[in-house]
Image (cartoon, grey):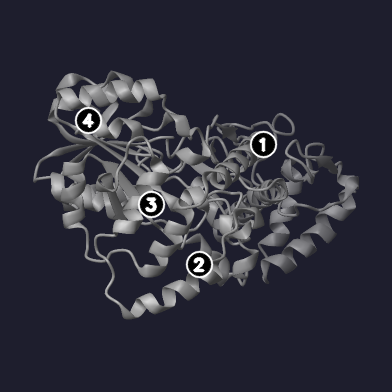
């Protein structure tokens, strides 16, 4: 690690893509309509096309676009750029607009236009991992900047950097950087001829007054990105706009892939950008209110899950630290996907390892379902791990108790001197209150079977008797039933 919280990356460290949660859910037989997506950063209030008060109709757009497929499109996208300029305001003209098919398309244009082999690019660690890939493909060298170091980046580092790319609000923590701090950073970047690229894709759901769009006409080293997909909850219409000085916009529009935006995407984008301001403002105001109210509920519910720690957020998702939990982010997201619940595994973000998930705001009833499912998969994970350990014990010769595991952070969880061969009871949940077990209310909601008052499978002689039965022939489920009947029942 070098000074100012920077970490250098090279071509060998391009990240592997994460598992596709939708694919996992569908392979488990869950229908597309039954999947609940907590991984998306799109507006949780839904699309304006689904709201009668927005007066938008996709069928009308389909009918208008149908004839356009037999014509050559306008590669200049003059009308789209004009509509975007009007929407963003602040003395922005169509000449300041660069239309793109998503943020990644725009970032690719920037890197291919600016980066030469060996150039340094600064990325805050919440960047989409794909941005690192595009930088490396362009010949650049990536240095990551931690959030707490943004205000204190040395002039030496800025002077070496060709581009500084960050997201506001932050794409991991959800924190909003103040406009004052960003203007200060922009001025410092200008002093060192560093292009500052600020991705404001999530800003409309937070506090649009923090935008740097109004700074574009007066500076030459600033590119602001806005993404209609997240603002208007239209994943299939991925129109992004780069807003920058006229000279740089001209360069980017020259390197754009020819006709990179299809007629349908263009028509949908223009219908959104041309919405009357009172309707658009009403929709966005309602969206921000929905995010605030349901984000607080999401944080409260997740914060009550044992060993989950939520981080304060200003936008439509919450970062959750699960480093103290019994399963990591990869396993948790996979198990939830098998139940049709998708959350964002953050392990492909820089330095996050398998310790964090990102959960987006949804209606309260969806949040309740998620939290209940988390409790279930945690127990399922513990049971599967225990059965794997039990099978390993039964495969060894001789089969004998392991004794007390004093290295376990939970030892002694029942009584001093306990035997930890069965760390997780193979009969869980037995639901037999004669054992001392009972149903208790989870702090996160719902009920769970608790073995706190039962220590039967931790007594040395009982462990030996159970192992004597379990090491016999047959399937494990049948042997467990026999062990309950022959060992546990007499004890009760």
Front residue of this view, candidates 345 and 400? 345
Q: Position of residue 193 (x, y in %)?
A: 14, 29
Closer to viewer: mark 2 or mark 1: 1
Picture quadrant of residue 156: top left
Dot 4 or dot 2: first in sequence order is: 2
Q: CA distance from mark 3 to mark 1?
A: 32 Å
Q: Is residue 373 visible?
A: yes
Q: Which mark is residue 83?
A: 3
Taking the image as shown, residue 119 lies to the left or right of residue 364, namely: left
Closer to viewer: mark 1 or mark 4: 4
Quadrant of the snapshot with the N terminus? top left
Instruction: Report the residue at 69% width, 31% height from top.
Output: 417
Disc 1 residue crowd, few under 14, some 14–19, many 20+, Cα 10 Å: few
- Residue 387 sits above or below residue 162 on the image: below
Q: Which residue is mark 2?
A: 23
Disc 4 residue crowd, few under 14, some 14–19, many 20+, Cα 10 Å: few
Instruction: Report the residue at 63% width, 60% height from top.
Output: 339
Q: CA distance from mark 2 to mark 1?
A: 31 Å
Q: Say if mark 2 contacts mark 3, CB within 8 Å.
A: no
Q: Which mark is residue 293?
A: 1
Q: CA distance from mark 1 to mark 4?
A: 37 Å
Front residue of this view, candidates 31 and 356? 31
């Amino acid at each position: 690690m070098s000074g100012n919280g920077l970490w250098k990356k090279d071509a060998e460290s391009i990240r592997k893509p994460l598992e596709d949660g939708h694919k996992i859910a569908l392979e488990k037989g869950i229908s597309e309509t039954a999947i609940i997506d907590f991984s998306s950063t799109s507006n949780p209030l839904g699309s304006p096309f689904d709201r009668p008060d927005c007066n938008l109709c996709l069928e009308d757009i389909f009918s208008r676009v149908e004839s356009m497929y037999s014509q050559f499109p306008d590669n200049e996208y003059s009308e789209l750029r004009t509509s975007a300029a009007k929407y963003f305001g602040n003395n922005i003209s169509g000449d300041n607009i660069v239309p793109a098919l998503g943020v990644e398309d725009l970032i690719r244009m920037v890197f291919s236009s600016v980066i030469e082999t060996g150039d340094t690019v600064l990325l805050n660690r919440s960047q989409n991992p794909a941005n690192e890939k595009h930088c490396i493909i362009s010949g650049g060298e990536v240095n990551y900047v931690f959030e707490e170091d943004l205000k204190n980046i040395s002039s030496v580092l800025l002077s070496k950097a060709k581009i500084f790319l960050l997201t506001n609000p932050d794409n991991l923590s959800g924190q909003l950087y103040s406009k004052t701090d960003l203007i200060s950073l922009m001025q410092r970047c200008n002093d060192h001829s560093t292009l500052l690229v600020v991705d404001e894709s999530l800003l409309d759901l937070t506090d649009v007054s923090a935008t740097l769009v109004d700074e574009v006409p007066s500076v030459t080293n600033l590119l602001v990105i806005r993404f209609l997909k997240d603002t208007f909850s239209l994943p299939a219409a991925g129109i992004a706009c780069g807003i920058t000085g006229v000279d740089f916009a001209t360069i980017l529009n020259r390197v754009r892939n020819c006709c990179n935006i299809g007629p349908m995407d263009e028509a949908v984008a223009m219908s959104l950008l041309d919405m009357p301001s009172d309707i658009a403002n009403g929709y966005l105001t309602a969206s921000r209110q929905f995010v605030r109210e349901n984000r607080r509920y999401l944080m409260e519910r997740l914060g009550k899950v044992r060993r989950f720690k939520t981080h304060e957020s200003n936008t439509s998702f919450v970062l959750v630290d699960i480093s103290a939990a019994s399963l990591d982010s990869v396993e948790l997201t996979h198990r939830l996907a098998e139940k049709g619940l998708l959350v964002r595994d953050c392990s492909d973000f820089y330095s996050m390892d398998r310790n964090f998930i990102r959960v987006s705001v949804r209606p309260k009833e969806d949040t309740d379902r998620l939290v209940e499912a988390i409790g279930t998969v945690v127990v399922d994970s513990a049971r599967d791990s225990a059965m794997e350990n039990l099978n390993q014990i039964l495969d060894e010769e001789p089969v004998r108790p392991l004794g007390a595991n004093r290295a376990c952070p939970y030892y002694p969880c029942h009584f001093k001197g306990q035997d930890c061969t069965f760390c997780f009871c193979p009969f869980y949940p037995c639901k037999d209150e004669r054992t001392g077990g009972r149903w208790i209310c989870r702090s996160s909601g719902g009920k769970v079977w608790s073995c706190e008052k039962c220590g039967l499978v931790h007594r040395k002689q009982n462990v030996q008797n159970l192992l004597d039965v379990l090491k016999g022939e047959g399937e494990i489920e049948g042997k467990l039933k026999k062990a309950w009947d022959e060992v546990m029942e007499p004890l009760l």
